[in-house]
């Protein structure tokens, strides 16, 4: 099997998992439009792959009021896009046992970037994706911590848990009446820049090697899975079991609410 989409808009694709997934998609023959804040990295992505395979758009997804304009620009410039891959993310430690050390502005920024901006992007792109005659997709990178949180990173854990809940609801809403497939990739800790707040040398050696993760994630996408759990902080089967039980419960609740005329 091959990756089923032809042109991916990869939001948060200039570093770490996003960059690696962008490289892998292009290697498989998929066009990629990468989105990020750092123009030098965007330019490097296009330079490495060539303008016939890659393009780039500079945008900060934290600017919520600009997201509708951004989505309109993307869909006008690249009408063949059939997949939006939302991958951006921030992670910081917050120690509430020492409240004087907690930066609530930084905490709220994590929630804003990791969750609220993804909701706004989803809302902005759904009309375009629905209008296509072929299957389209929204792909989200969340985290194992969406299922089992890590105490030292409460904002990251909470934002990914919120995003996971949103994805479960979104999938239920879209799967019966639209052509949009909702896919969630749940990584473990991966050796990327995400953990630089712990120190670059230490942080970038935490977790699964990036190439191993990328290969597993790509294979899950090729296999057509819509929930791809890779590795875990604890036993992977425990995380998968919790995730599957939650998913079944969400489906049952959705059925019940539809019967009551609420969904």
Image (cartoon, rainbow, N blue to C red):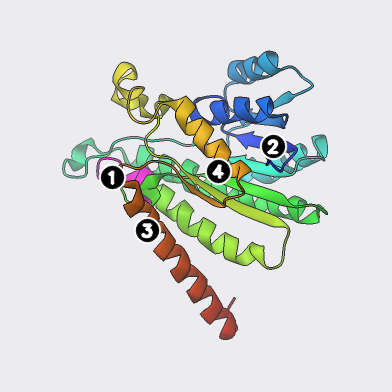
Q: Residues within 10 Å of mark 4 (few under 14, many from 20)?
A: some
Dot label at residue 241: 3
Q: How many numbered marks does the figure carry?
A: 4
Dot label at residue 128: none
Q: Earlier in the sequence, mark 1 or mark 3?
A: 1
In the rendered structure, are the residues bearing label 2 and label 3 in contact, judged by CB atoms less than 8 Å apart? no
Give residue 150's quadrant in the image. top left
Q: CA separation, marks 1 and 3? A: 12 Å
Q: Nearer the viewer, residue 59 or 211?
A: 211
Residue furthest toward the front? 1
Dot label at residue 220: 4
Give residue 231's quadrant in the image. top left
Q: Which of marks 1 and 2 is nearer the N terminus?
A: 2
Q: Earlier in the sequence, mark 1 or mark 4?
A: 4
Residue furthest toward the bottom? 260
Q: In this view, does 31 lie to the left or right of 61?
A: right
At 42% from the left edge and 44% from the top edge, which residue is drawn? 143
Q: How crowded is mark 1: few (under 14 residues within 10 Å), some or many (20 or more)?
A: few
Q: Which of marks 4 and 2 is nearer the N terminus?
A: 2
Q: Is residue 127 left or right of residue 169?
A: right
- Per the image, label 4 sits on a secondary structure element best described as helix
């Amino acid at each position: 099997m091959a990756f089923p989409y032809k042109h991916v808009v990869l939001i948060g694709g200039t570093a770490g998992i996003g960059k690696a997934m962008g490289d892998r998609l292009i290697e498989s023959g998929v066009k990629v439009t990468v989105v990020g804040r750092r123009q030098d990295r965007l330019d490097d992505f296009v330079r490495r792959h060539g303008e016939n395979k890659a393009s780039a758009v500079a945008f900060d997804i934290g600017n919520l009021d600009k997201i509708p304009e951004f989505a309109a620009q993307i869909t006008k410039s690249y009408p063949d896009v059939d997949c939006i891959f939302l991958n951006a993310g921030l992670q910081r430690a917050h120690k509430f046992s020492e409240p004087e050390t907690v930066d609530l502005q930084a905490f709220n920024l994590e929630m804003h970037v990791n969750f609220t901006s993804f909701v706004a992007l989803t809302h902005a792109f759904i009309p375009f994706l629905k209008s296509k005659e072929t299957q389209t997709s929204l792909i989200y990178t969340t985290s194992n911590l969406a299922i089992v949180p890590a105490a030292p990173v409460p904002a990251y854990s909470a934002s990914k848990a919120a995003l996971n809940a949103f994805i479960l609801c979104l999938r239920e809403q879209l799967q019966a009446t639209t052509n949009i497939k909702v896919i969630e990739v749940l990584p473990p800790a991966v050796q990327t820049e995400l953990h630089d707040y712990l120190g670059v040398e230490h942080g970038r050696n935490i977790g699964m090697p990036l190439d191993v993760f990328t290969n597993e994630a790509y294979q899950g996408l090729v296999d057509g899975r819509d929930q791809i759990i890779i590795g875990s902080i604890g036993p992977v089967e425990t995380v998968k079991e919790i995730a599957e039980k939650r998913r079944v419960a969400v489906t049952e609740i959705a059925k019940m609410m539809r019967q009551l005329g609420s969904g």
